[in-house]
Amino acid sequence: MLNLRKLFPLSDPSKKASALNEKAGISAPEIISEAAAGQIKQSRRKLPTTTELLDGIRSANITALSRAITLVESTNVSHQSQATELINACLPYANKSVRIGITGVPGVGKSTFIEAFGKYLTGLGKKVAVLAVDPSSTISHGSILGDKTRMEELVKDPNAYIRPSASGATLGGVARKTRETITLCEAAGFDTILIETVGVGQSETAVHSMVDFFLLLKISGAGDELQGIKRGIMEMADAIVINKADGDNIRKAKLAKTEFNKALHLFPAKKSGWTPTASTCSAMTKDGIAEIWHNIEAFLELTQNNGYFKEKRIEQNQFWMMETINDQLKQHFLNHPQIQRLLEQEKNAVQNQTISPFAAAQKLLDFYFKSE
Ligand SMILES: Nc1nc2c(ncn2[C@@H]2O[C@H](COP(=O)(O)OP(=O)(O)O)[C@@H](O)[C@H]2O)c(=O)[nH]1
Ligand SMILES: [Mg+2]
């Protein structure tokens, strides 16, 4: 018979062992004293002034940056006006970064890629901020992006800052907050901003309108790579990267690359003068990561020399101005109590075909303009 005791000796053979014995737990040390906890609570309650926040941001204080972003994301009216003030104060220090958008369907490896790419960039001495625009967070009020579990190394990196997606009622609202967060991160000295978004809904368009370079991540599929890919996204992309080009996948990924390069040739020339290309990489083995950055550097050199870089940023700023106006006008209209009532009434009328949709809209708008 086997002597189990001999095979698995117990640490204290003098004690009678049973699998049911429970070790006495170690009592949890008191991490913070009550007084300290009180102080923390007190300082949390006290909102820092705009100047305090600006000073904090300018000295690259991450706590100040996070609090400023929370302020930007707040729906509280007084927070919003302070946020506007703060963003204006940050503007002179902003704008000096490269903003890169990263999109792709769930599972393509965006978070893993950002971990590898972000580490590569901090290795070059860059300061990297990772933000996200996540349309699903507008529904679930919780972010699936900015996935910190896939960014274990980057999370620990003192030269990286990862902020999960804001939540909100509309994609436009969420995207605007991310756009404003870019300004805060830039003022805090982050020189490379990575913005992740999932390839659903209109989120790519929103991210495209706040970045300098737009990268589309793909994986090699069953052969017909172009199937199911939205033309609009191909047109937006400044580079297509086939991820997971490792192990048995390398050959398929290279075939996909060739197919995408052929397809990219068919698109009309870009205003930027840049010719997008497809390449392969592995976020896991890090093959091809450096080449992606070299490609972005070439893009920056080209567009900074031909003026496109600056021109596009001006266009984007004007776009966000108009977006904000559109958003607020619409919200104001929809929040109007009498409009809410009339809207239901006219919707029914449209359903019953007693009024044309255009006449119904006109009726509502006329009422709204008169009541203002
Ligand atoms: N083999 C391989 N797997 C990868 C690579 N990049 C990501 N993955 C895996 O793909 C899955 C989805 O990755 P994730 O980064 O969460 O994708 P996301 O949904 O686009 O953010 C995870 O299981 C990753 O480990 C890669 O380059 N090679
Ligand atoms: Mg992810």
Image: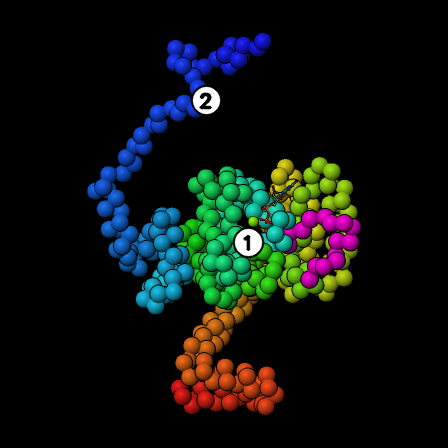
* Mark 1 CB lies closer than 8 A to ligand 2: yes
Number of numbered discs: 2
| Quadrant including the N terminus | top right
The one of 290 and 109 positioned closer to us in this rendering: 109
Q: Main secondary structure of the magenta part?
A: loop
| Quadrant including the C terminus | bottom left
- Expressed as whole percent of the image width and height from the top left, the position of residue 354 reads 59, 90
Residue type highlighted by circle 1:
Glu
- Which residue is under mark 1? 196
Q: Earlier in the sequence, mark 1 or mark 2?
A: 2
Q: Is residue 67 magenta?
A: no
- Expressed as whole percent of the image width and height from the top left, the position of residue 100 reads 56, 54
Q: Is residue 228 magenta?
A: yes
- The label shown at residue 19 is 2
Q: Which residues are magenta?
A: 214-230
The one of 141 and 116 positioned closer to us in this rendering: 141
- Expressed as whole percent of the image width and height from the top left, the position of residue 82 reads 33, 64
